[in-house]
C-alpha cells in the first residue's frame, strides 16, 4: 500500500537547515551590559538535558562564563530536570563546558584580562539539531547608562504608539 503525498508549496515548504530554533534568551544581559562582541559556542550536554532544552525548561538569567585552563565553562545556567528522566537527570545548576575554537578562547581570555570585560550568555538555541549558545563580551553598564536605556526604550514605545494612533 502506497501513501499519497501532496506537494502543495503553500503548505509544505522545506525548512531551512540553518534556521535557529530559539529556546531561551537572556533579556537582562542586554540591559545590564554594553555588548561589544558576540560569538556562537557549542555546549556539552549530558543525559536528558537535551530533552529539557527542547521543552524550553532552561533559565539563563544568572548565568555567566569563565575561562579556566584553556576551556570555557558556563555557570548557573539552570536546566530543569526532565520529568521522565528519573535517575538519568543531571544536577540543574552544574557547570557545563562550552565548545569554541582554540584561537577564539585565547582571544576571549586576553580581552577579559586586559579590558576587564565579562563573558555573558545571550541566547540558547538549536541549529541543525545541535544546542548552541550565543555568548558576548560585555562591559557592565553604570546606573546612568541603564537610565538612558530605559529612556530610549520608552521613547521608541511612544513613537510606535503615535504611528499606530495616526493610522
Image (tube, helix red, strand yellow):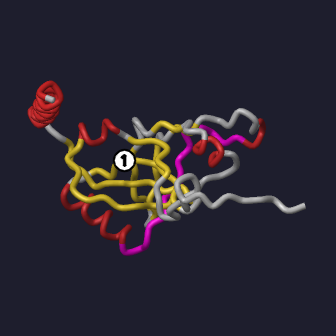
Q: Answer above or below: position of 145 versus 48.
A: above
Question: Can residue 90 be found in the magenta stretch?
Answer: yes
Q: Answer with the quarter of the image where residue 106 lies.
A: bottom left
Where's the N terminus, which quadrant?
bottom right
Please state which of residues 137 and 58 is positioned toward the viewer in this rendering.
Answer: 58
Q: Position of residue 156 (x, y in %)?
A: 14, 34
Q: Residues within 10 Å of mark 1 (few under 14, many from 20)?
A: many
**Residue 143 visible in the picture:** no
**Residue 96 visible in the picture:** yes
Q: Answer above or below: position of 60 versus 67.
A: above
> Which residue range is magenta in the image?
89-103
Question: Can residue 95 be found in the magenta stretch?
Answer: yes
Q: Answer above or below: position of 8 versus 79.
A: below
Q: Position of residue 87 (x, y in %)?
A: 78, 39
Residue that label 1 marks: 122
As drawn, the residue found furthest toward the right would be 1
Identity of the residue drawn at 36% across and 47% down: 122
Identity of the residue drawn at 18% across and 58% down: 115
Amino acid at each position: 500500500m502506497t501513501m499519497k503525498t501532496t506537494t502543495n508549496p503553500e503548505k509544505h515548504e522545506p525548512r531551512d537547515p540553518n534556521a535557529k530554533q530559539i529556546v531561551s534568551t537572556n533579556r537582562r544581559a542586554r540591559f545590564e551590559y554594553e555588548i561589544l562582541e558576540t560569538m556562537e559556542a557549542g555546549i556539552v550536554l549530558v543525559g536528558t538535558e537535551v530533552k529539557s532544552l527542547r521543552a524550553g525548561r532552561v533559565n539563563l538569567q544568572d548565568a555567566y562564563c569563565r575561562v579556566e585552563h584553556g576551556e570555557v565553562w558556563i555557570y548557573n545556567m539552570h536546566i530543569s530536570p526532565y520529568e521522565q528522566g528519573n535517575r538519568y537527570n543531571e544536577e540543574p545548576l552544574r557547570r557545563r563546558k562550552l565548545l569554541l575554537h582554540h584561537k577564539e578562547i585565547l582571544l576571549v581570555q586576553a580581552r577579559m584580562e586586559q579590558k576587564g570585560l565579562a563573558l555573558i550568555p545571550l541566547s540558547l538555541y538549536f541549529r541543525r539539531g545541535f544546542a548552541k549558545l550565543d555568548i558576548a563580551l560585555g562591559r557592565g553598564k553604570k546606573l546612568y547608562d541603564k537610565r538612558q536605556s530605559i529612556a530610549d526604550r520608552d521613547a521608541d514605545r511612544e513613537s510606535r504608539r503615535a504611528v499606530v494612533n495616526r493610522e
